[in-house]
Image (tube, rainbow, N blue to C red):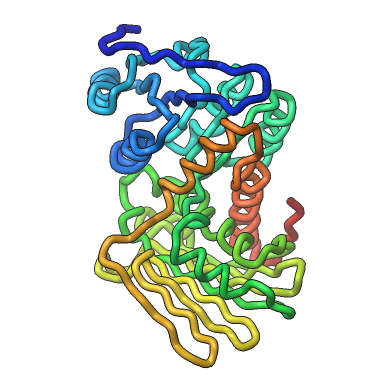
Amino acid sequence: MGAFAPVRKVTTIADGRPKEKVEFALVGAGNLAKWEHLPNLKKLSGVGLRAVYSAAGVRGKSYALRFGAAYATSEYEEILKDPQVDAVLIASRNQHHAPQSLAALRAGKHVFVEKPMALTAAECAELSAAVEESGRQLTVGFNRRFAPYYRELKDSLAGRMAPAVVQCRVNSPGISGAYWMADPAIGGAILGEACHFIDLMYWLLGSEPVSVSAYSLPTGKADPIGENNIAASFRFADGSVGNLTYCTVGSRTSSGERVEVFAQGVGAFTEDFKRVGVHRGMRSAKSKMWPDKGYLAQMADFAESIRHGRAPAVTVRDGARATLGCLAMMASAKSGAPVALDV
C-alpha cells in the first residue's frame, strides 16, 4: 500500500451526533465509477474518497490520483483493515458483488453495491443476515428511483384506489456477443440489468410481486443468447400487473428503455431518462437534452443515511427482491410455467 497524497483526517463521533465526514473506498475501477460515482463523491460535502482498490494496480492508481484518494491498493484486505474507511463502494463485476459486500459488512463497513446485489438466493440470505448482525447499512445502485422523470411516474400513481398496469420495454443490444455482461453464467443481461426493472415496478406500485410467467428466445445459442431475451408478466399483491420485455437483439439506434404506467384516469410514460409525459385529461410532456439518471441523488441519500444512522432509501431487502424476481423470471422461462415469488 503506497501513499502518494495527503491522508485526510476523519473525525468519528461516538456520542450520537452526525458523523462529520464519511470516507469511501472504491472497489472496481471501471467506467461507471469513473464517469458517475467518483465525480459524484467529489460533488458532495462531508464525503471523501479514502482509497481505491483494483486488481489492475495501474488503473487503480490512476483513479486514485485523478480523484484525490489517499492511496490505491491491489489487495482488498487493505481497505477492509483501514479504520478510516467508513463505506465501501462496490462497482466490480457482477460475480464479485455478493462476496465483496459480505466481507465488507463483516469488517464493519457500510456498503454501496452496484446491481445486482447477488446472483443467488443463498447470497441474498447471507447478505440480509450480515446486515442485521453487523448493524451496518447496505444499499444497491437502483438509481432510477432517484431520477426526476421516474419520480414523476411514481407521483402520477400516488393516491390511486385500484390496481395499475406497468409496462417496461428495454433494448440493450450492447450486452451481447463476447461482452462479459452477456454471459448467463455470471448473471447475463437479466440478473445484471433487468433487475433494475423488477425493483422499479415494485417501487412504482408500492406492492410486492407474487408470481411471474415468462418466455425467452431459444437457449443454447451463442448469438443471440436466448436467456438474455425475455418477455415476462408479473402479478403484484395489490392486483396490479407489470410487463417486462428485455431484449439484446434490437438495433443500436433503437431507444434504450421506455416505461409506461396506467391507472384509472392516468397514463404516463418516460423514455431514456430524457422524456416524460403525464396525461390526466390534459397532456403534459417535457424533455431534456442531458438526462439526470439519479446517481448523484442516490449517493447523497446513502451518505446521509450513514451520517445520521438511518436506513437508506434502497435496502438489502430491495436488492434481494430484484435478484429473486430475476431468478423466478428465468425459471419460468425455462419451465414454461408460472413461478411464485415470496420475498
Whole-percent x, y for residue 108 in the image: 61, 19
Q: Residue at x 65, y 39 (%)?
A: 311
Compared to residue 125, the image places residue 3 above or below, namely above
Where's residue 203, x and y in %? 61, 60
Can you say whether 294 is above or below 52 in the image?
below
The residue under the point 31% across, 55% down is 174
**Left or right of residue 148, residue 251 in this image:** left
Residue 123 sits above or below residue 331 on the image: above
- Image coordinates of residue 14 in percent, x first then y, are 64, 17
Residue 182 in view, yes or no: yes
- At x 29% / y 37%, what residue is drawn? 34
**Which residue is at the far bottom?**
281
For the residue pair 170 and 25, the one nearer the viewer reads as: 25
Instruction: Please tell me in which quadrant of the rendered image residue 48 appears.
Output: top left
- 213 sits left or right of 192 in the view: right
| Occupied quadrant, residue 67 | top left
Looking at the rendered structure, the number of numbered marks drawn on it comes to: 0
